[in-house]
Amino acid sequence: MTSDRQSAEPSSSSCPPDAAASSPGLRWHTVLLLALLAVPRVITHDLALVPPGSPLNALLAVLPPVIWVLVVLLRRAPRPLLSLLAVGAVYGVLLALGHQLLWEQAFDSGTPQLGGRLENLPPAAHAFITRGAAVISSLFTGVALGLVAGAVAAGLQALGRAMRRG
């Protein structure tokens, strides 16, 4: 059995060079576990369990990406940006799934309705459009969070290399 650190470094004997070059640098289960760290905030937000703007809400929002960055740095992932982009993409899927599962509970005053020229659409169309927009927004949010965290990790990794050299 290999550790995540060992598997983060591509091995020419275990996979073709082009597969190693596209690998995020973390094993799939590590990517999933890191993405799952951000799910409690989805639940607490949608169920209004933690007040917005509270210290606990801030902790639930900030701590997972900080942990993502730390894990990538400590494991010396060869491609931190790609690694955390993968984590963010998986988180985006989990975010979308969580919002869809908790949709009814998240809206005490009724589910969102379209306005303007779209307000006379059938209820199924309202649901399809609003839920679809929520899915797209969730996926974008996850990827954007992964991209930002990955950029931070890549920058810190490069800074660490420069400090060791100089």
Image (cartoon, helix red, strand yellow):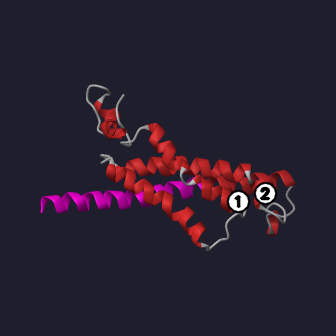
Q: Is residue 137 visible?
A: no
Q: Which percent across, then down, holds residue 76?
A: 30, 48
Q: Mark 2 points at which residue?
A: 105
Q: Which percent across, then down, holds residue 135?
A: 65, 52
In space, the residues marked 1 and 2 are separated at their CA atoms by: 7 Å
Q: Mark 1 points at which residue?
A: 46
Q: Which residue lies furthest to the bottom in this view?
A: 53
**Crowding near the residue tagged with mark 2, few <14, some 14–19, many ≥20 C-alpha atoms within 10 Å:** some
Q: Which percent across, then down, holds residue 25?
A: 36, 42
Q: Is residue 4 above or below residue 122?
A: above
Q: Is residue 48 visible?
A: yes
Q: Is residue 158 magenta?
A: yes
Name the residue nearer the viewer: 163 or 132.
163
Tell me which residue sits at (38%, 55%) in the image: 70
Q: Are the residues tagged 1 and 2 within 8 Å (C-beta)?
A: yes
Name the residue nearer the viewer: 19 or 34.
34
Q: Quadrant of residue 68?
A: bottom left
Q: In this view, does 27 lie above or below 118?
A: above
| Part of the protein shown in magenta | 138-166
Disc 1 marks which amino acid? Asp
